[in-house]
Image: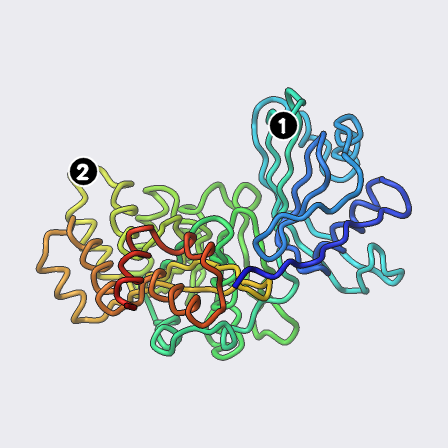
Amino acid sequence: MTTQTMDFAPYAFEDGLNADTVRDFFVWCERQSASDIHIQGGNHLVVGHQGRLRQASRFVLADDTWSKLLDDLFSPEIRPTVRGGRPVDRAIQLDGDINQRYGLERGERLRFRCNFVQATAGRLDTTIALTMRIIPSDIPDLTKMGLEEDLFEALLPSNGLGLIGGITGSGKSTQAAAIYRFCLDTDPDRKVTTIEDPIEFILARPGDVLASTQLQIGRDVANYAEGIRADLRRAPSIIGVGEMRDLETFQAAVLAGQVGHFNLSTLHIHSPGEAIPRCLTMVPSEMREATAHDLLSVLQYIIVQKLLRTTDGKRQAVREYIIFDDGLRAKLASMPYPEWGRHIDSIIRLEQRRFADQAWRLHLEGRIDRRELAVAMTASQLRELEQRAV
């Protein structure tokens, strides 16, 4: 079965091209359920929609026009910073008002995570390429995300460390935000704080007993480790750490888990078995064995997610995960720590819970086509599954 072709008509820009009509375009993209917006000189405007790239303007954006729009749309220091060879990450927000500016109702807001970088693109020697991740206005309901029952029950322990992994765009931040919001809705006695770079989902809602505080790197604190240390003095129950990116952050998160807080963070990994080795690469070699056992004592679960394009033009999440119970901890503790990752992945393989197993089942059900199998499995895994089916 081939993937259904989804119609996606470009935005009309009926009132011309200026900062306000581009903001209207940003809102339109969100209304079309786009996930990303890509803008660069010498190119049509392009959006990511259900895992596919779609042309979103009828015109090619001239580079000099784009340079002027950048200054009008964003902070004036962004263009010279990027032109100086320094990429910029920034979150922006559009707010509606009584006049329904940009098509947003009063009190409605849209947030975007933006990355600006200078690059060669086509015939342009240099242009500024902007990638905007559209942050959904509403945090998804955790109970409707199709989580496996045992995983759902394990998501909010009293202490320790949970890790959510995957490639860029696999829904790590969305999954984390849904967990935080579920906690706030179902257990308001637990205080939730986050440290992010930049802040994506706004967690607080009217009626919360205590609105979540969200620290932004570079604005509120210098780095993740400093944010964790600050949060430890603020009696949190759950500390959300945007990304486990360096040794100091890793050590602070493990310590927080040891002293009675639950930390949730993300990693760029492809399988649960990669998480522990990835964390330990941050650690000096002479400290790795002791640190591995410290990590093992606090780990509660590792989730890795992929999004597969379905034949109805949507996307389906598939997950590999491992939950750390006393039995698994004891088994791993009896093994040399360099073998832990392979053992974790072997459990998932033996239980037929790999991405490959899940994608194969979806393919047999007609939910994804054969080309999409390449996203979830290697050629050797495909041959293995085909032989098993004979």
Q: Is residue 162 visible?
A: no
Q: Which residue is mark 1?
A: 121
Measuring 68% from the left and 39% from the top, which residue is drawn there? 39
The residue closer to the viewer here, 306 or 123, is 123
| Residues under numbered marks 1 and 2 in contact, where contact means CB atoms less than 8 Å apart | no
Say whether residue 131 is left or right of residue 290: right
Q: Which residue is mark 2?
A: 285
Q: Earlier in the sequence, mark 1 or mark 2?
A: 1
Q: Secondary structure at mark 1?
A: strand
Say whether residue 297 is left or right of residue 153: left
Query: Residue flagged by tag 2: what amino acid is it?
Result: Ser
Q: Position of residue 346 (x, y in %)?
A: 21, 60
Q: Is residue 345 visible?
A: yes
Q: Pick the quarter of the image with the C terminus.
A: bottom left
Query: Residue flagged by tag 1: what amino acid is it?
Result: Ala
Q: Within 10 angstroms of label 1, few (less than 14), some, or many (20 or more) residues?
A: some
Whole-Å distance between the Cαs marked 1 and 2? Answer: 42 Å
